[in-house]
Image: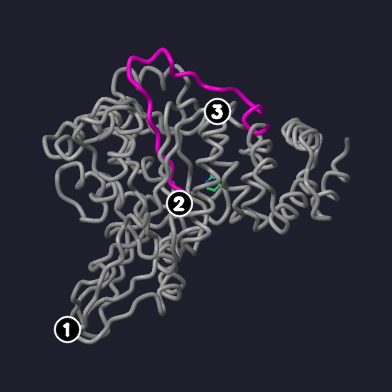
Amino acid sequence: MDAISVIRTKRDRERLSDEQIDWVIDAYTRGEVADEQMSALAMAIFLNGMDRAEIARWTAAMINSGERMDFSTLPRTTADKHSTGGVGDKITLPLAPLVAACGAAVPQLSGRGLGHTGGTLDKLESIPGWRADISNEEMMRALTDVGAVICAPGSGLAPADKKLYALRDVTSTVDCIPLIASSIMSKKIAEGTGSLVLDVKVGSGAFMKEIEKARELAETMVGLGRDHGLHTVALLTDMSTPLGLTAGNALEVRESVEVLAGGGPADVIELTLALAREMLDAAGLKDADPAKALADGSAMDAWRRMIAAQGGDPGAALPVARETHVVMAPSTGVLTRLDALGVGVAAWRLGAGRARKEDVVQMGAGIEMHAKPGDVVTAGRPLLTLHTDTPERFEYALESLTGAYDIAAPGTEFTASPIVLD
Ligand code: URA
């Protein structure tokens, strides 16, 4: 077998055989297939697709490229959630301790932000002392003692995906259903969770801009889960406007803590509770009451213990950016659109995200929104506050906010899109 013939097969719109898939994933993991060859294959897959059987085999080969975790000795059932990525998507932060407070164990292996979408690990790293990299033993201890852990996947888990994802990111081959589905599901299946709830985002701030594409992605991932005996369900949720009122690392941690304290924006609370119910159902804990766990402080207690178990100080002050710039509403009326992509790119340009993997993110950078679609805004009053340590970035960030919001005449009827679409 050789890489050139595998690339040629997909370039010429033919099916990859099981042997070709197994060989290319294994050889790439071992360094025998070069990055430029894998880039060419990823682009051929991006352009010509893969059928269900090819995706299933590709996923299995990525799982087999590394170790599999085993949580069967834990006293609680495991339940995990994965979001396909969005703007202001801080849901994992309140969700993991909330589901733990209701009796399940949540082994949440998370990622970092790249491009305009934020990453859970970057957000949590704004908490002084908190560590994303922990050993498998520490993970098991946290799951036993606290019931929730949010950490970086160990280097042994689906190493083929780790290499391939980094390559896709710099070769414009990320937003491809076979590659996204196999990337996410290989990690989740190798992680060994008992059940999985997928939050598939739809809209300008998501990889999938149209609901039909999001549905295809969701069905592909649910099918892959089923093939591997992993109980998987998916929700399609709105990402046309940012979730909550903040986008940026420390800003989002602050908002998540507000939700755990019984406050916070209505959309963040609604989606957190909807996903918690799905996770608890999937874990067989149908009688658990996540709304009660949020209200009675038990989710907050689990959050504090989860953060402390990874070296973080849950009571410490969070980083604040050195400079702010306020964008005033240009007119009085009803905010009818606040675009997730525009806000996400602005937050990223302010320093909340990275352009290259090695970039350092600014913990305090990001955007605070003073209104959500449907709210009345007043001319000359704050609409958005931009935060950064590097004020020379304001102009660049403001460019991406041009045309990112609409204000209609006072009294205009507005019906908000539901958060959970399907
Ligand atoms: N998240 C992943 O883990 N992989 C993808 O391909 C896209 C989002």
Please give the residue where the numbered disc 1 appears in the rendered image.
411
Residue 121 visible here: no
Relative to 373, residue 119 above or below: above
Amino acid carrying mark 2 in the image: Gly
Look at the image and say whether residue 65 sits in the magenta stretch.
yes
Whether label 2 touches label 3, CB < 8 Å? no
At 81% across and 50% down in the image, what residue appears?
14
Please state which amino acid type lies under the numbered disc 1: Gly
Q: Residues within 10 Å of mark 2 (few under 14, many from 20)?
A: many
Kind of residue at badge 3: Ala
User: Visible in this render: residue 99?
Assistant: yes
* Mark 2 vs ligand 1: CB below 8 Å: yes
Question: Which numbered tag is attached to residue 190?
Answer: 3
Q: Quadrant of the N terminus?
A: top right
**For marks 1 and 2 on the same chain, the one whose residue lies earlier in the sequence:** 2
Query: Label 2: which residue?
Result: 85
Provide the residue span drawn in magenta: 61-85
Q: Residue at x 31, y 51 (%)?
A: 252
Mark 3 or mark 1, which has the lower sequence index? 3
